Image (cartoon, rainbow, N blue to C red):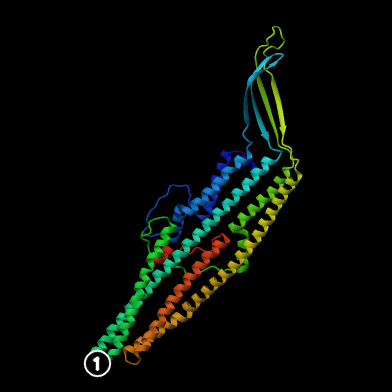
Amino acid sequence: MKNIFLNINNTKLVMLIVIFFLNTAFLVPDPTAPVKKTQHEHSTLQEILAEAALNNPGLKAAFHQWKAALESIPQVRALPNPQLTYAYFIQEIETRVGPQQQKIGIMQMFPWFGKLKLKGNAALEAANAEKQNYETVKLTLFYRVKDIYYDYYYAMRTVSVLEENVRLMEYLEEVIRAKYTTATAPYSNLVRVQVELDKLQDRLKTAKESLRPLVARLNAVLDRPLDTPLPPPGEIPADAPELSIEQLADLLKENNPALKAIDSTAAKAQIGIKLAKKNSYPDFSLGVDYMLTGKAAMPGVPDSGKDPVAAMISLQLPIWSKKNKASVNEAEAMYSAVLNKRKESENNLLTRLETVFFQYGDAERKIRLYSDSLLPRARQALEVTRSSFESGEADFMDFIDSQRILLAFELELEQAKTNRAQRLAELEMLIGKELFDFTTKDTKDTKD
């Protein structure tokens, strides 16, 4: 595998192969492809994620940083540029075979055996770290898109639930108004229902206006005009994966790209120790000088006018032992620092995983509570109260209270579904792997 990076053309080939497999694994289009900004009439979350991968400037920047790091590999593996020298003798040097007028020479410096290979391996590890940084940026971007998308879903569901409750309150107002007209209901009931209706209409207006900043946030991530219309989001499926914290922790340690980036940095630092030890050996240069010589002043001189050629060798002598030892100590300290940073990052990520996993489980518990228990009872209570109210057997405030409870439960359920989806997206970002595709049912649920 290491021989692949011997020249820049092979480096580009490897880079393209890596990008292909990486993007195939995560369904991400090539960031170098031409950008097509289109408005989807029925965009699913997966389509929005693909558009974000194509258009987001931050992801493009991370990709080009990775690409730049790959381009550095053939540079550090190559020999230093040779040095060409030319000298013109202001005053000719007279020799037996003739006067020397000028000379030209070339010299090539060669690092000590193994240095170039180590430098190339260090550059490769640096490129691997940039690749994992790209992965981190991509996962963070996908989490941001999902987080905003699910907020958008909740806002749209809030609008829908409030519209339904407004219609219910308008129906109730008609009933109260009819009873008031026939003197079977007091005027105070009519005023109360109108107050409740106004409050619901105000909440509905706020909910609709909250859609605008959410659309702007999502469009900003997609790098398109902030006022670009978005289609309504699909439903969030009711089912979700069964997860365990132990399984997630293992996946995080294995797949998290931020940890992988630190691992590559640690490998680079370890190579740096070997390279620092190589500094105790001399670099050397080989060269040749060619001197242009004129004809000898005296005739009959053997080799008259013959241009001499001189082979040269020079050594850089690493005689300062304290300097060389300090270089090794510096590299070892850097390696220790990276290892401790890796441990600290893993601890922080595992702590965050615990928190997010608790929030995910709490949202799942609330979904079951509201779906299986509270909402069915609240709907039943509202129907019973409405029937009793229409027949005159229930008080007006009983009906209002039942309606308020149902509205609160409906919104709590939607909030719990949103929270669960967002926390699942955050878990996927932390472990670097998809756990469950909430988007597979977008189109189906929307049609249903």
Q: Relative to 364, is 333 above or below?
A: above
- Residue 70, image x, y percentages: 57, 45
SS class of the residue under badge 1? loop
Q: Relative to 321, is 185 above or below?
A: below
Residue 292 placement: quadrant: top right
**Quick check: 98 left or right of 372?**
right
Q: Residue at x 68, y 25 (%)?
A: 288
**Quick check: 178 left or right of 113?**
left
Residue at which label 1 appears: 183
Q: Residue at x 36, y 85 (%)?
A: 400
| Amino acid type at mark 1 | Ala
Q: Quadrant of the C terminus?
A: bottom left
- Residue 365, image x, y percentages: 52, 76
- Residue 374, image x, y percentages: 46, 81
Q: Residue at x 49, y 58 (%)?
A: 141
Q: Relative to 16, is 171 above or below?
A: below
Question: Toward the viewer: 213 or 171?
Answer: 213
- In the rendered picture of this protein, how many numbered marks are placed on residues? 1
